[in-house]
Image (cartoon, rainbow, N blue to C red):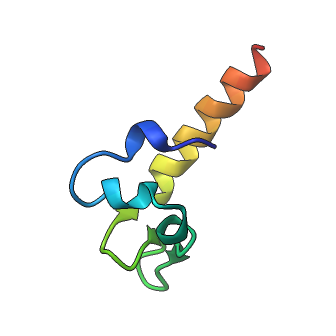
């Protein structure tokens, strides 16, 4: 899934660096995807984005 269009602003822009993006982890308590620079994405957001991505792919 391509998140490029979502990676804007001071916290998310650095995630365009592949090496930083690859450092994603799941926070054990919050159960969100987090990065060392403090960025995080909620699982609900990722789920909805994945659904939209899959729907768009199915329409091709």
* Residue 38 left/right relative to 29: left
Residue depicted at x 53% and y 70%? 19
x, y percent for residue 11: 26, 61
* Residue 13 left/right relative to 23: left
Quarter assignment of residue 36: bottom left
Q: How many marks?
A: 0
Residue depicted at x 32% and y 53%? 13
* Residue 55 left/right relative to 36: right
Which residue lies most toward the top here? 60
Residue depicted at x 49% and y 85%? 28
Instruction: Answer above or below: position of 25 versus 58.
Output: below
The C terminus lies in which quarter of the figure? top right
Quarter assignment of residue 30: bottom left
x, y percent for residue 38: 30, 74
Instruction: Answer above or below: position of 28 versus 45.
Output: below
Which is more toward the observer, 8 or 57?
Answer: 8
Which is more toward the observer, 11 or 33?
Answer: 11
x, y percent for residue 14: 35, 61
Instruction: Answer above or below: position of 19 versus 28.
Output: above
Which is more toward the observer, 14 or 31?
Answer: 14
Residue depicted at x 63% and y 32%? 53
Which is more toward the observer, 23 or 47?
Answer: 23
x, y percent for residue 49: 54, 39
């Amino acid at each position: 899934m391509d998140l490029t269009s979502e990676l804007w602003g001071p916290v998310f822009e650095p995630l365009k660096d592949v090496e930083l993006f690859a450092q994603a982890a799941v926070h054990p308590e919050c159960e969100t995807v987090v990065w060392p620079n403090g960025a995080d994405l909620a699982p609900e957001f990722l789920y909805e984005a994945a659904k939209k991505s899959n729907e768009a792919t199915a329409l091709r």
